[in-house]
Image (cartoon, rainbow, N blue to C red):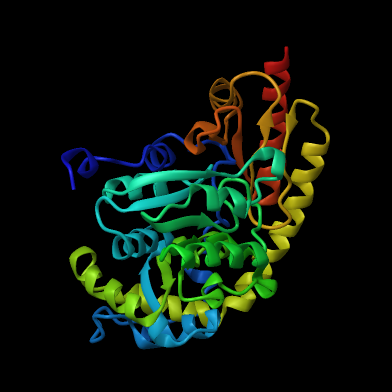
């Protein structure tokens, strides 16, 4: 690994932590945080120290049941971001070729480069509804490709990749001896209608997810990876270098949350269904943006018909106390990512201000 790769950082994550905050925050993409008092839990259910350094069995069992896989296929991790780090670190070596969708979630790009990969891209185009075109994947693949990286639902657009397309991608990866890493954290927003994890389509797939985005349980850091058992074992051993032992109170709280997940999901499902209607109504009213509408999830990725998205985002935040994510973090400078998972009253107020900022830009 060269010196440059060791000092790479995520500009998006730094922006999100230090500059995205606003009175009306439409930059966030996860459900409002659940308070501890909203979980049916007592201190007697918690312990501080674990005797299971390679994952708390009740948590692994609960996640295996949820994902419909064997327990030995599950690796727990501190959220999806770290799950992606652990998975990618186990799947590639410095100098390996990694093929990543464009646009994509910026930390995935930064991570691949940090790990010393040679990064190639395949396009997901606005004109095609940001769908994956297997022909474009095939054109970008080479004998040197060791890993393909996809988000599903797509981040930043919220677009779903259907099962047939995902299977086609798996077949292409298999033909070159590659693996496919799929970040599925937004698939959780399907709740009871959640499609199967892509891991079920073949052992070339490795998938990641967490309880963060769909359930408002970010503070638990309950993330996971699903992979073939031999790769899972490699990840557990590699994690000895990263996190060593987990936060056991968090593991136990995650088990408690998973036992109550249907109740938590019902609250989230109702909120998102209502908010998606609100966002669609707003977008229908605007002639100055164009978009690909997601049917699920928590995000949409509008494109300005004129003007500069960075200038618009600055105006929106500074004058109208509202934030969205500038499209430059997804390599699409005329777009912005709008999150609609906040409380409905805040969403309506934020969209009103977003409309006022668009009107000012038009003038």
Tell me which residue sits at (45%, 62%) in the image. Answer: 181
**x and y percent of residue 225 in the render?**
42, 71
**x and y percent of residue 193 in the render?**
70, 73
Tell me which residue sits at (37%, 82%) in the image. Answer: 229
The outermost residue toward the top is 363
Is residue 102 or residue 18 the one in the foreground?
102
Is residue 131 or residue 55 the one in the foreground?
131
Tell me which residue sits at (53%, 48%) in the image. Answer: 139
Asked which quadrant contains residue 176, the reply is bottom left
Image check: 294 left or right of 54? Answer: right
Is residue 203 or residue 285 the one in the foreground?
203
On-image quarter of the C terminus: top right
Tell me which residue sits at (70%, 46%) in the image. Answer: 345
- Answer yes or no: is residue 190 visible: yes
**x and y percent of residue 175 in the render?**
48, 65
Where 177 falls versus 30 (above or below)?
Answer: below
**x and y percent of residue 291 in the render?**
72, 38
Asked which quadrant contains residue 286, the reply is top right
């Amino acid at each position: 690994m060269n010196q440059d790769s060791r000092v790479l950082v995520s500009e998006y994550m730094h922006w999100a932590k230090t500059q995205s905050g606003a009175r009306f925050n439409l930059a966030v993409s996860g459900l409002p945080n659940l308070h501890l008092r909203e979980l049916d839990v007592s201190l007697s259910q918690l312990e501080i120290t674990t005797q299971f350094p390679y994952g708390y069995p009740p948590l692994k069992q609960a996640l295996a049941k949820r994902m419909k896989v064997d327990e030995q296929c599950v690796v727990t991790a501190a959220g999806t971001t770290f799950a992606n780090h652990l998975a990618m670190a186990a799947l590639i070596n410095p100098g390996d070729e990694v093929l990543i969708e464009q646009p994509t979630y910026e930390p995935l790009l930064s991570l691949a480069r940090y790990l010393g990969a040679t990064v190639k891209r395949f396009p997901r185009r606005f004109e095609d509804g940001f769908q994956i075109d297997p022909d474009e994947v095939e054109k970008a693949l080479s004998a040197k490709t060791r890993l393909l990286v996809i988000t599903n639902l797509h981040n930043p657009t919220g677009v779903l990749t259907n099962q047939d397309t995902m299977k086609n991608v798996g077949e292409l990866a298999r033909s070159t001896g590659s693996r496919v890493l799929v970040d599925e954290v937004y698939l959780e927003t399907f709740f009871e209608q959640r499609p199967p994890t892509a891991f079920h389509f073949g052992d070339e797939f490795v998938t990641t997810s967490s309880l963060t985005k769909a359930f408002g349980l970010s503070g638990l850091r309950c993330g996971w990876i699903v992979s073939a058992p031999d790769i899972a074992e490699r990840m557990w051993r590699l994690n000895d270098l990263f996190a060593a032992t987990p936060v056991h109170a968090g593991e136990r709280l995650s088990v408690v949350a998973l036992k109550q997940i249907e109740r938590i999901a019902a609250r989230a499902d109702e909120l998102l269904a209502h908010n998606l209607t609100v966002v669609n109504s707003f977008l229908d009213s605007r002639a100055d943006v164009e978009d690909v509408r997601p049917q699920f999830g928590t995000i949409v990725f509008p494109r300005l018909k004129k003007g500069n998205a960075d200038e618009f985002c600055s105006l929106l935040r500074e004058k109208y106390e509202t934030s969205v994510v500038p499209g430059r973090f997804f390599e699409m400078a005329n777009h912005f990512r709008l999150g609609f998972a906040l409380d409905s009253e805040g969403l309506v107020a934020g969209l009103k201000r977003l409309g006022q900022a668009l009107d000012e830009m038009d003038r």
